[in-house]
Image (cartoon, helix red, strand yellow):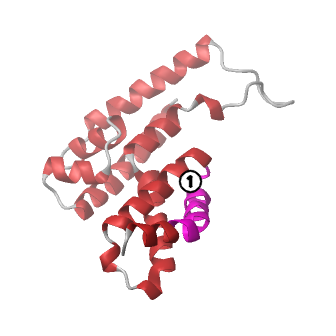
Amino acid sequence: MTNAQFGQVVEQYQKLVYTVCFQLVRDHHTAEDLAQETFLSAYNHIDRCPPEHLKPWLARIAANKAKDHLKSAYNRRVAATDSSMLPESPPPGAPAPAGPEDIAVTREELAAIQGMVHALKEPYLLVSEMYFLQNRSVEEISRALDRPSKTVHTQLYRARRLLQQKILERSAVQ
């Protein structure tokens, strides 16, 4: 496929690819970036797709790019710290904003949860520290610990259940 032909493909399917990305990420700028990544990936692998299946192939690439973005450690970290999503003033009838005492309690709770993660036994300790405290993806953890990703998923599932149980026990005591 020539560059001119690929340019026509981009022109024909750019709205479809953008819409697929936007439907998943719900952010205009991110959807545009993911659409560009989609077409770049499609250009690099165009020889793998028969021309009659071009439209669903592009839609699948776009969906996979958006899903990968949503699962990324970067996205989880940005979503957790994005203050633009917080309301500027509480809605009517809502409780007053958190004061210094409430923030201190939150810090204490955070420290307690971090302590619970550090108290886990292997094989859950390293996996939990890397996932919950360092915001690493399952793929990164799998490579770093030289474990299959399914094993990492299972260990995270079990660690999460152990942590939930510890948190429930802690809240029952208080």
- Outermost left residue: 146
Residue 140 against residue 84 in the figure, above or below: below
Residue 170 magenta: no
Tell me where the magenta segment starts and ends, as one range: 10-26
The residue at 86%/30% (across/down) is: 92
Where is mark 1, residue-wise?
Answer: 25
- The answer to whether residue 15 is magenta is yes
Q: Position of residue 151 (x, y in %)?
A: 23, 61
Closest to the observer: 86 or 9?
9
User: 154 or 74, which lies in front?
Assistant: 74
Q: Position of residue 166 (x, y in %)?
A: 40, 41
Query: Amino acid under label 1?
Result: Val
Q: Main secondary structure of the magenta part?
A: helix
Q: Position of residue 35 (x, y in %)?
A: 50, 57
Quadrant where the N terminus sits is: bottom left
- Residue plotted at (57% across, 59% down): 24
- Across and down, in percent, residue 160 comes to 38, 49
Name which residue lies at 51% across and 78% down: 55
